[in-house]
Amino acid sequence: MFTGLIQSTGVFHSRNLSGRAGKLRVRTARAFPDLQMGESIAVNGVCLTLEKDLGGNLLEFHVMEESFRRTNLGNLNTGDLVNLERALAVGDRLGGHIVSGHVDGTGTVLSLGKNGDDTELKVAVSPEVREQMVPKGSIAIDGISLTVAALGEDWFTVCIIPTTWRETNLSQCGKGGVLNLETDMLGKYVLNMLRRMNGRRESNVSMNTLYEAGFLE
């Protein structure tokens, strides 16, 4: 489990795929103390297993083929920045929101613009991911805990404060860029529960339904 508060960025080094799994290497911007092989680290919001510390802050992760295919990890170019967060430890502060590291889908950057000191990011989103979102709800973008500022039929916006812009990979994204998206975990559980209670796989219950009914704020 993660919080969406990025602890460091890293530089994408390389990847390879053999069969249904592969390796991904990232050079971190700073050293992580007390790394344990097998621990979970979120890379651009994707929960990965650390397999090797190759020295010089170069880490190697085990990645399933599906993760390369369903997230932006398969689109990375050498030198691209990635966001890194180690798993939440018992007793740590939950400063962002609960993030599982299981990406729901990707979104495409539609526009970037200034809103005072902040940066407004507009992202196109699929119907499946859009259904799980509500205005002012939480969303993880490339692993960063953010708040949905506005929500359209097939898009949403977030406002990014200068510190987040400076300390994460968002400063390198541009129009057409692909971002990993994970919607709010608690909302998804409630949505799934209500659908099951309704007795059929698909229903008229959506995240907007929950928002309007007062289940979400």
Image (spheres, rainbow, N blue to C red):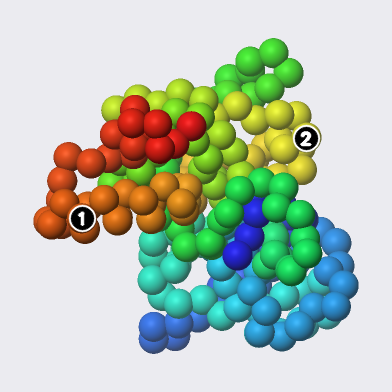
* Residue 30: percent from left, percent from top: 85, 62
Type of amino acid under label 1: Met
Q: Residue at x 61, y 44 (%)?
A: 145
Residue 43, image quadrant: bottom right
Q: Which residue is mark 1?
A: 197
Residue 10, image quadrant: bottom right
Q: Of residues 67 and 47, which is closer to you in this image?
A: 47
Task: Inspect this view and state whether residue 11 appears.
Answer: no
Considering every residue shown, the one lying at the far top of the view is 116
Q: Is residue 29 left or right of residue 17?
A: right
* Residue 64: percent from left, percent from top: 45, 77
User: Does residue 61 sit above or below 18 in this rendering?
Assistant: above
Q: Earlier in the sequence, mark 2 or mark 1?
A: 2
Q: Residue at x 29, y 28 (%)?
A: 153
Q: Of residues 13 and 41, which is closer to you in this image?
A: 41
Q: Which residue is mark 2?
A: 163
* Residue 48: percent from left, percent from top: 58, 72
Q: Residue at x 40, y 31 (%)?
A: 214
Type of amino acid under label 2: Thr
